[in-house]
Image (cartoon, grey):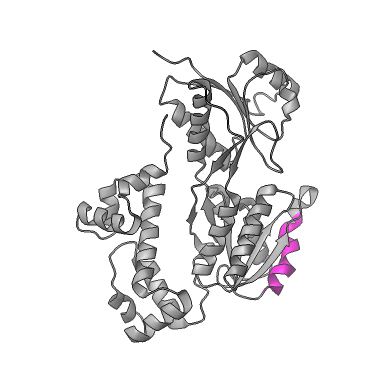
Amino acid sequence: MEEKKIRIALLIDKSESYDRGLIRGIIKYSNLYSPWEFFFAGPDYLAADRKKHLIHKIKNWNPDCIILNDRFDLKDFEGIKVPIMVTPSNHKVQNAVNIVANDKEIGKIGAEYFIKRGFENLAFYGSDYLFWSTDRKQSFKETVLANGRSYFEEESLINEDWQNNPRNLVSWLQNLPKPVAIMACSDEFGIHLIEAAQLAELDVPREVAVLGVDNDEFICDLYRIPMSSIDQSPEEVGFLVAQTIRKFLVAGEEMPSEIVGTNFHIVTRLSTDIFAIEDQQLKIALEYIEAHSATKIISVDDVVSATCLSRRLLEIRFRNVLNRTILQEIKRIRQNIICSKLILSNDPINQIAFDMGFNSLTSFSNSFRKEMNMSPVEFRKQFKSKEI
C-alpha cells in the first residue's frame, strides 16, 4: 500500500552550505518513498513574504512537520499541532527537536589534527554568544592542554561590529608565538583569520595555520590561500532528519529532543598544509609522505632516501616527535586519503584502488579491511543513513 505523501515546510536558509546539505539529505531520503511535498519561502526578488503572511500560508498548507531556523519564534506557530524542528544558532530551543552537531567532538578533532601536525602553539577563535562555539572551544582547549601544548583564544566581535573583526585580530595574531595553529568556530569566522593574517603580513600557513568548520567551498576558496575545514556531513544529517520524521508519522515512534550529527572529516587545503616541526629532516620526510602517498604505495626506504639521515636515526626522530613509526605515518596518511576519496567522491572503488597504486581490487580491499576492520564498501555506506 502506497504511503500518504508527507508534507514538510522548510524554513531554513537556502544560501547556507550546511542548510543546503540538510535539504539535499531530506529530499534524498524522501525519494525512497512516494515523493514528499515541500514548502519553501520564495526568493526575496520574487516573493518578499512578510513573516506574518508567510506563517499564515504555512498554516493553510497543512504541513506534517516544520523545519526552521531561529529567526522564527515557536510562538509564531501556535495552533499548528505538528512537530517542529529547529537548526539553532545562539541557543537550543525548548519544546522543539534541535538539529545539532556533536560540537565537543568537533573541537577535539580540530585540536588533534593540529597536534598530529606538530604544532606546539594552538588557539581558538569564536564567540561565547553561540552555544556551539563555546562547546567546540572548551573541547579544543581541553585536548590542547591535555597534550602539553600552549593554548590561546580570542573572542569575536559580533552584531554591528562584525565587519571590524579582521582589523581587530591583527595585533592578536602578531603577538601570538609562531608558528601557531588556529581553529575557528566556523568558516565565516575562519575567513576573518585569513584576512587578518594578510593585513598583518603573516604567512599562511607557515606562521599562522587556519582551520574552519562547515567546509563551505564558496567561503573556503574565497582567498588566494584556500582554507581547510571540518566537514559536518550535513546531507547525512538531513537524511537522518527525514528518517526521524517518517518514523514518527508512519511507525508512531516518539520524536527525540535532539538529532545529533556525528560524522566529521577534515578537508585539508593550503591554510594548514604544513608541518610545524623544527627538525628539517623530519619535515622533509613528512612532506615526502604527503606528496607521494596519493598516487603510489611508498616504502619506509623511499622516505629515508628523501632525507640525509639513516633509517635508524629517522625512526628515532619519528618516535620522539610524533610518537609513531615511519610506517605508521605512511599508513595513516594513505588511509586518510583513501577515506576522503570514499567519502567525498563518487569514484568507483576499483578506480580509487588503481589511483592509489594497488594492482587489484582484492589487494586494496584486504589492505583497507586490515586497517579499518571493514571493507571499503561498508565504510562508504557508513556515511549514508539506512532507511527504516
Whether residue 170 is in magenta: the answer is: yes
Q: At 29% from the left edge and 54% from the top edge, which residue is drawn?
A: 369
Q: Quadrant of residue 282?
A: bottom left
Q: Is residue 226 visible?
A: no
- Left or right, residue 304 beside residue 258: left
Q: Outermost residue toward the right?
A: 160
Q: At 24% from the left edge and 55% from the top edge, which residue is drawn?
A: 366
Please name whichever residue, 300 or 256, is drawn nearer the observer in this view of the structure: 256
User: Does 377 sit above or below residue 296?
Assistant: above
Please name whichever residue, 105 or 356, is drawn nearer the observer in this view of the structure: 105
Q: Position of residue 108 (x, y in %)?
A: 56, 59
User: Does 183 sit above or below residue 236?
Assistant: below
Per the picture, the main secondary structure of the magenta-coloured stretch is helix
Q: Position of residue 202 (x, y in %)?
A: 63, 71
- Left or right, residue 334 beside residue 11: left
Q: Quadrant of residue 182?
A: bottom right
Q: Is residue 47 visible?
A: yes
Boundaries of the magenta span: 164-176
Q: Position of residue 161 (x, y in %)?
A: 79, 52
Please name whichever residue, 36 or 97, is drawn nearer the observer in this view of the structure: 97
Q: At 68% from the left edge and 18% from the top edge, which residue is drawn?
A: 80
Please name whichever residue, 203 or 83, is drawn nearer the observer in this view of the structure: 83
User: Does 327 sit above or below residue 380?
Assistant: below
